[in-house]
Amino acid sequence: MCGIVGYVGPKDAVPLLIEGLKRLEYRGYDSAGVAVRRADGALDVRKCVGRLSNLEEALEAAPLAGGLGIGHTRWATHGEPSEINSHPHIDCSGGVAVVHNGIIENYLELRAELEAKGHVFRSQTDTEALPHLIEEILKGGETSHAGAIRAALRRARGAYALGIVFRDEPGVLYAARCGSPLIVGVGEGEQYIASDVPAILNRVKKVIYLNDGEVAELRASGATLSKLDGTPVVPEVKTVTLRAEAAERAGFETFMLKEIHEQPRVLRTLLDAHVGKDGVVNLGPASALIDEAATGLRRVLILSCGTAYYAGMYGRLLIERWTGIPCETDLGSEFRYRGPRLPENTLVVAVSQSGETADTLASVRLARKMGCKVLGICNVPGSTLLRESDAALLTQAGPEIGVASTKAFTAQLMAFALLAIRMGRVRGALDARRERELTEELARIPDGIHRVLDKQDDVRAVSQKYYECFNALYLGRRFNYPVALEGALKNKEISYQHAEGYAAGEMKHGPIALINEFLPVVCLCTPTADEVHEKVVSNLKEVEARKGRIIAVVAESDRTIRGMAQDVIPVPETIEEFSPMINVVALQLFAYFNAKLRGADIDKPRNLAKSVTVE
Ligand code: G6P
C-alpha cells in the first residue's frame, strides 16, 4: 500500500526520494509525487499517475533541487488514481505539504468545517483535510509548526503515517504516526523517514520506530520526538541487522522468483534457530508464553488475512492433531465485526508477514481487550503486531518484496509445525520419540523443495499448455485444502487468470457444473499413504468422467494418477502434515509461469498492495 520517503540533510533530496520510492514499489501503487523545499524558498510539488518512471520524466523535464523533501506512492482509497488526488497535498497558500498513508476517518466533517472557513479543496482525498487544518491552526495564532501538527492530529480520527514539510521552515522534516508504520532513518548529518525499512536500507543502519501518537521533528543534526500533548519522548535508536542485498534481485528476473528460490534456505534458517541437535523444538523467547499457555489452554484462535489466513488454516489442523486443543481460525476483517465469544484461556495466534495489516491488528486489539494473550507469528521485527503481542515467533524469511507472498508463507507453515510440536510436547500429547521423528522429517523439507525448484522447467512446460485458459479450479483435501486455496490465490493475483480453490470433497456441491474439456483442474494428490488419498482419487475420477483437464501434483513414485491426468507435476513425498510446504512450491511456480507467459508485471500486480494498512 502507499509508500512514504522523506529526507533532510545536505544532499539533493529528489534522487534520494526517488530511489527510496523505487524500493517501496513492491507495496503496490497507482500514482506518485514529491514535494521539495527549493533553495529559493518555494515549496514545489510534482505528481504523476502511473509508474515512478513517469514522475522521473516529469522531474527531468522540470527539475527540482533542495535538501528537504517528501515523496509518496499512492494506492487509491478516497478518489480515483489521478494527478490531483496523488500526494503530496498542500494547503491554500502552498505553505505546507503533506504525504499520508492510512485513512482520516472524519475527513468529511473536517473538510466541511474548513470549506466553511474559506479553504478551497482540490482533491477528493481524505488527506487534503490535514494541510488545510494545519494552515487554519497556524492562522489562528499557533506559532510553532510542531504545535500546529499536534493540534491537527488531536482532531483527526483514523490511521496515519505522515511526512510534512513547510515552506517557511527550511531544514526541518516532520513525521507522525498513528496506526500506519513509519520509521526514522538516522544518518550522519542527515535524517530520513520511510514507511518500510527496505526503502532506506542502503542509506542508514540506525532507525527509530515511531510509536502511535508520536510526532518527530527531524533536522540534519538529529531527531526530537513528542507525544500529541507535547510531552517529549526519548527516542530509542535501533540498529538494523538486515543487509541491503536482502532487498535486491540477486540476478533473478523478478523478486518473486528470487523469493521462491530462497525457500529452502529460509526454512533451514528457521529449523536451525528452533530445533536442537537432539531434535527438540525450542521456541526461544516465545517458549515461556507458549509453554505456560499450552498447559491450561481451552482454545486456540488463529487470526490473519490473505495468504497468512491459509497458513492459519494449516496451523489449525496441526494444532488440533498434535495437541488435542480445539482450534479455530478467522479472518481479521470478519472477527472484528462478528461479536466474538471467546472462552477463558484462549490463546490468540496472529499471523502476518508484515505485522501491519489493519484488520489483523484490529482483531488482535479486540482479543486483547477480551483478556486473551497473543502470540504473533510475523516476518518483520519491530512491526506493530509484534509490539502489541505478548510473545513473538519470527519467521525470519528476510524482506519479501514480491507482492504475492511465497517465502513468508512457507515460513509461516514451518512456524506452525514447530509451534504445534512444542505445544504437543508440553501437553504430553506427543512423546519425545515422536517429536524427534517429526523434526527429522522437517529437516528433509528444504531438500524436498530444492528438488521441486530443480524441475522448474517441467512446471513451465505445463504452464505453456494452460496459460491462455480463462479459469482454473484447484482442489485439495485436509492438509492440502489450504494449499489449493493458496495456489488459486497465487495464480489469480499475478496472472489474472480466474482461479478458485475448493475442498475436493465439496466439488460435487457446485464447481462440478463448470467442468468440461476446457477447464484445467489442478489437484493436490500427495502424499499417497494417507486416508484421504483414495478420496482424492475418486474426486479426480469425477473430473475425468466429465473430460476436465487434470493437472495433478503427484508423488514422484506415483503410478495411479498419471493414467488419469493430462499433466503431472511430480514432487518428493513427505508425511501428509508437511506435504503443504513442498506442494505449494509447485503451485507457486505454476502461477509464476502462467503470469510470465501472459506478460503480467509479476512483482507489481495491478490493484494489489503488499501490506494492507487500511480496513
Ligand atoms: C496483502 C498481500 C498478501 C498478504 C495479505 C496479508 O493482501 O498482498 O500477500 O497475504 O495482505 O498480509 P500480512 O502482511 O498480514 O501477511
Image (cartoon, grey):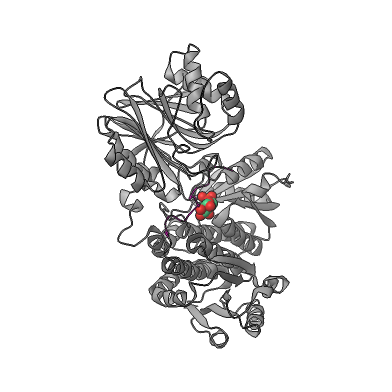
Q: Verify whether residue 94 appears in magenta.
A: no
**Horizontal and vertical percent for residue 433?**
56, 68
- Position of residue 550 relative to residue 472, above or below, is below
Whether residue 72 sits left or right of residue 155 in the image: it is left
Task: Choose between 204 and 602: the one closer to the eye.
Answer: 602
Residue 178 appears in the figure: yes
Q: Main secondary structure of the magenta part?
A: loop
Q: Residue at x 48, y 76 (%)?
A: 572
Pick the quarter of the image with the C terminus: top right
- Position of residue 173 relative to residue 376, above or below, is above
Q: Residue at x 47, y 23 (%)?
A: 149
Whether residue 412 sits left or right of residue 167 in the image: it is right
**Horizontal and vertical percent for residue 143?**
44, 13
Q: Residue at x 61, y 43 (%)?
A: 364
**Horizontal and vertical percent for residue 534?**
65, 81
Q: Residue at x 61, y 71 (%)?
A: 476
Range of magenta residues: 601-615
Counting every numbered tag in the picture gives 0
